[in-house]
Image (tube, helix red, strand yellow):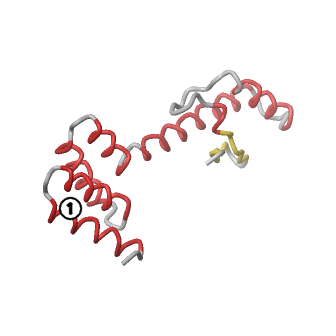
Amino acid sequence: MSTIRVRHGSLEVNVPVSVFFRGTAEFNETASEYFSMLRRRYPWLTPDSLAVLRRTAQREMQRIIDERLRGPRKAKMLSAEGKDMQAVQHLESYLVERPDDADAWYALGDILCKMGRNEEGYKAINHGRRLSGSL
């Protein structure tokens, strides 16, 4: 993902992810150049409209970050911190909402096996394989 799509009224722009500090929804020093370019390209945009675009872009980036930190990625982070039981609970809750997420099933299986719950782990991994068409 190199851009995020942001709308303000009928205007839709692709905001480059590079205008954010990595892993955050905070703008870096290149953001002012990008929004200045938008102002030149769309001279009818008022300062208030640009401010709305900036806030909307930040909210969308935060939504994307939050979404990525759900599911398997967050579980792997928890497991790396030695919080395997929390990781399993997180994935089980996540899979209620997204039962077709093969990566989440793989992650669940890996963590369960790591905890010594091999039978459950293999079942989760095999379920992920069926979902992804690998079996």
Residue 83 is drawn in which quadrant? top left
Residue 103 is drawn in which quadrant? bottom left
Q: Which residue is situated farthest in the top direction here? A: 29
How many labels, in total?
1
Residue 130 to residue 113: above or below: below
Give percent across and percent down for residue 79. Answer: 26, 42
Q: Residues within 10 Å of mark 1 (few under 14, many from 20)?
A: many
| Residue nearest the viewer, comparing 121 with 24 | 121
Q: Secondary structure at mark 1?
A: helix
Residue 14 to residue 103: above or below: above
Q: Amino acid at mark 1?
A: Gly
What residue is rendered at 54% in x and 39% in y?
61
Q: Which residue is mark 1?
A: 121
Q: From the viewer's perspective, is 87 left or right of 49?
A: left
| Residue nearest the viewer, comparing 3 with 52 | 3
What residue is rendered at 64% in x and 47% in y?
5
Give percent across and percent down for residue 114. Answer: 21, 50
What residue is rendered at 77% in x and 26% in y?
33
Residue 131 to residue 6: above or below: below
Give percent across and percent down for residue 17. Answer: 63, 38
Give percent across and percent down for residue 87. Answer: 24, 45
What residue is rendered at 56% in x and 26% in y?
26
The C terminus lies in quadrant: bottom left
